[in-house]
Image: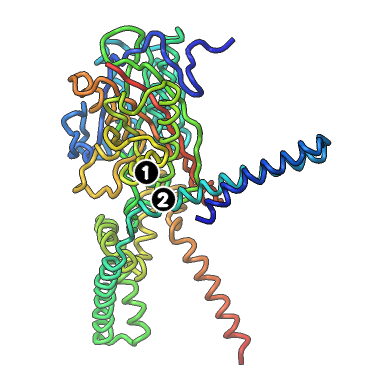
Amino acid sequence: MSANRLVVAQPLVLFLYKSALNRQNITGGVHMVEQNELEHQIEMERKLFEQKEYQDLVKKVKPKVPLLRNVIGAFLVGGTICLIGQIILGGFIAGGLTQRAAIGATAAVMIFLGSLLTGLGVYDNLAKFAGAGSIVPITGFANSIVAPALEFKSEGYVFGLSSKMFVVAGPVLTFGFIASVTIGLIYYFLP
Amino acid sequence: MTAPKRIGKQTVAFDNPPVIIGRASAVGPKEGKGPLKDYFDFIAEDTYFNDTSWEKAERKFFQTAAKLAIEKANLTPNDIHYFLAGDLLNQIISATYTARSLPIPYVGLYGACSTMYEGLALGAMLIDGGFADHVLAGVSSHYSTAERQFRFPTEQGVQRPLSSQWTVTGAAAMVLAAQGQGPRITHATIGKIVDLGVADATDMGAAMAPAAFDTIKQHLEDTGRDPGYYDLIVTGDLAKIGHRLVQALGEKQGLDLSKNYTDCGLLIYDTSQDVHAGGSGCACSGVVTAGFLLEEMQAGRYQKILGLGTGALHSPIASQQGETVPGIAHAVAIEF
């Protein structure tokens, strides 16, 4: 409402300013420039107001994100993926691997499963239901590499598949490298 | 001297309204299961259309529609003087490679999803201006080619927001002629770019709605008509959110669009097809107009239609640099 009043008020200000100029019979160049600037400013303000008003309207019309449904979906699927990982980890340890080796082996199996499900065209349908639940685990990382690799194969193995493979996962890798180097340096210099 | 065929600010009125003498639509399997399935000339069994890439498939759809439209007009490609065509892909490759297979002088157009109506408006001008006897106007789009150019790889596991739309896979083509039987293009209103600061690339309907409303309003002002003059006012691909926004803008400015206003993006799929807000893409307004609207006009259901092609001139590069999405809409009045 206050923004509305502002817009109504501005032409009034302009009008008063103009009539003041007329009364004083000033038509000097300096004042003309000032007046143009003022008009320009008012026009910009009007546009901004129009944009804001429209964006408020869009907000009203746009459907709300079904937050509760998404959270439940993410919890169920994300939890199940982690549970599967845990079972595999337990299996490797029971089979005689050390804890450290079992973690590496489990990650490899999960990455394989994520890639396989992406190749079979299942993972994106799972993600439609699960959202973050299937993006956050390591299977989601596998999906983000295999999906572009599959799709850009049509542009060849060099310029398509291998160069576009990291188009989605690239930032994750970059920031991962930066984080590991930073932590490595801290570890090295701290006693 | 003022141009004699111009009326008002943005509209042209044709002296001898060009006739749409041939039209054809070719669509993918999802569209072929939708509510308009019986209206399409050709439905492909899969989105690869027996080819090795989606891009190649897209131009096959285009070639199929172009060939069928010329046949249905009882002409050969040599009778056509201009081919006005466009699509969504970079360098409009679907249109260009389709043109490569045809012996017709080619004018490439880019108006994002508004291209079908951009082509109809320009084609009608060429014909009524006396520069051509026959003009072929056509467009294509493909869900998978558009997704991978503008958004994510299709197998990427992401949740599509509820405001997102589904790009129609298919192509449409229409043959315009100076004489003949069929619906006639009586007026064309070329739209201005309108950008009210929508930056969300998953909400194209909201980005285009102000442009659509601006062109509708300008068309009615220029022609002195009111919305009730038309049996149907139909926008290209605003879908659920954009359609509602145009109506809301109408309410605010005293233009009643509650009765006879619809959108191609609402018509082409039904709600069970998991398309969220509705259809989009060049082919959305293309196949719905060529397949459904003009068919229903010839069947006598509609006499006067105001069709609008609506385009979100979205570029991933501009978006990543912080730009908003400019919208455009062109209107064509079709009367039978």
Q: Which residue is the site of mark 1?
A: B248
At 41% from the left edge and 50% from the top edge, which residue is drawn? A57
Residue A64 visible within the image: yes
User: In the shown orientation, is residue A5 left or right of residue B85?
Assistant: right
Name the residue at the left extreme.
B38
Q: Is residue B96 above or below residue A47?
A: above
Residue A47: % across, % down? 56, 44
- Looking at the rendered structure, the secondary structure element under dot 1 is helix
Front one among B227 and A4: A4
- Looking at the rendered structure, the secondary structure element under dot 2 is helix
Cβ atoms at labels 1 and 2 below 8 Å apart: yes
Front one among A136 and A174: A136
At 50% from the left edge and 51% from the top edge, which residue is drawn? A52
Chain letter of the residue carrying label 2 = A
Q: Which residue is the site of mark 2?
A: A57
- Which amino acid, mark 2? Leu
Front one among B291 and B29: B291
Q: Residues within 10 Å of mark 2 (few under 14, many from 20)?
A: some
Task: Report the Cα–Cα distance between label 1 and label 2.
Answer: 8 Å
